[in-house]
Amino acid sequence: MELISLIAPVFAVILTGYVFSWTNLLGEDTSEALVQFAVYVLIPAIMFYLIGQEEFQNLLNYGFYVSYGGTILALFAVLFIGLKALTSFQVGSATVLAFAGVASNTALVALPILHAIFGSKGALPAVLANLVVAILLLIMTTILETSAGHKASAKTPIYKILLNVLKNPIIAATLLGVLYSFTGIGFSDAVSDYLELMSQALAAVALFAIGFTTSVRTIVQTGPMILFLTVIKLLVVPGVVLLAGHLIGLDPLWIIAATVSAAAPTAKSIFLLAKHYDQEPQLAAHIVSATSFLAVGTLILWLFVLHHLHPTAFQLN
């Protein structure tokens, strides 16, 4: 009952978004506007606030980076090799599909869920998980640029790719937060109250947008490859991350945050890169949609598992 009372409001907001989408009371561009507001205003604010208020050494949780980032990178390599060996996919397509099977939408899914359940203590690991995903996406972009860039509408120089990544408001806010944390200045009460108020809006806006964009029809369109990668993304990846966290000896809260981050649906940015480089964009789009829909159920499953393993950690908020 304790866990249900914690997660019920989270998924009730998602359901509310889905109901409003189904009733057509709001325009089709509602979700896009909410996502833009979250990406350009709310998430950068909470990224900068959560990281900037921490002591710099608190950000150097190497066990988290190994158990989450290292596990995802290793699973990507296994998927990539398997897709190349067992299918007719070329390097570019195999890269896109392998990343679709491991890279999470940490900013718009894991972050608001962990912040809603645990407050700032749970959101900080999600912020660092988002940085890990950003680095992995940069690796993916580099591979696509060097191996399949000839299929893109215009080949982009590597320095421009790096510049575009750094100009992303979420990445920029994260890096600025790290730099500000290094100074040790901290925030005044007025600034803290302002940024805290901004962060409180994130959960409702992001979770409502998730529900609003969820489509049951996409499940009907899934084929064997999409189903396979969806199972890998929502069940296998978080399971391996959970195991790695326990083997490394992470703090229970960080284990929970790493697992939830790994269990989040596929990042939408993968579809954008697949579209740009013409590397299986339809498959990427269906994987994003299928994982976004099914993650509502699998995230509840993982939260129940995590609550059973670490019940005291859920009393932190």
Image: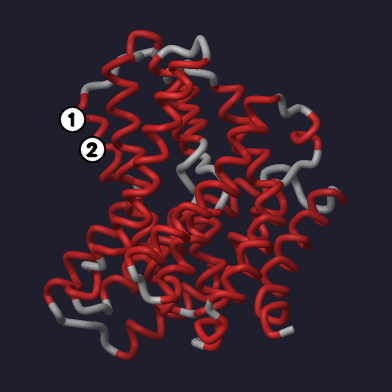
Seen in the picture, residue 91 relative to 168 is either above or below; the reply is above
- The quarter of the image holding the N terminus is bottom right
Name which residue lies at 34% across and 70% down.
249
Q: Secondary structure at mark 2?
A: helix
Name which residue lies at 55% across and 54% down.
263
Q: Which residue is mark 2?
A: 163
Residue 153 drawn at (x, y percent) = 40, 12
Q: Amino acid at mark 1?
A: Tyr
Q: Secondary structure at mark 1?
A: helix
Residues 79 and 166: in front is 79
Estimate the spatial distance between the alpha carbons at disc 2 and disc 1, rounded to whole Å. Answer: 6 Å
Name which residue lies at 66% across and 38% down.
289
Question: Residue extending furthest left?
Answer: 183
Q: Which mark is residue 159?
A: 1
Residue 291 appears in view:
yes
Name which residue lies at 59% across and 48% down.
234
Seen in the picture, residue 213 relative to 118 is either above or below; the reply is above
Residues 268 and 35: in front is 268
Question: Residue extending furthest front?
Answer: 247
Q: Residues within 10 Å of mark 1 (few under 14, many from 20)?
A: few
Residue 19 drawn at (x, y percent) = 83, 56
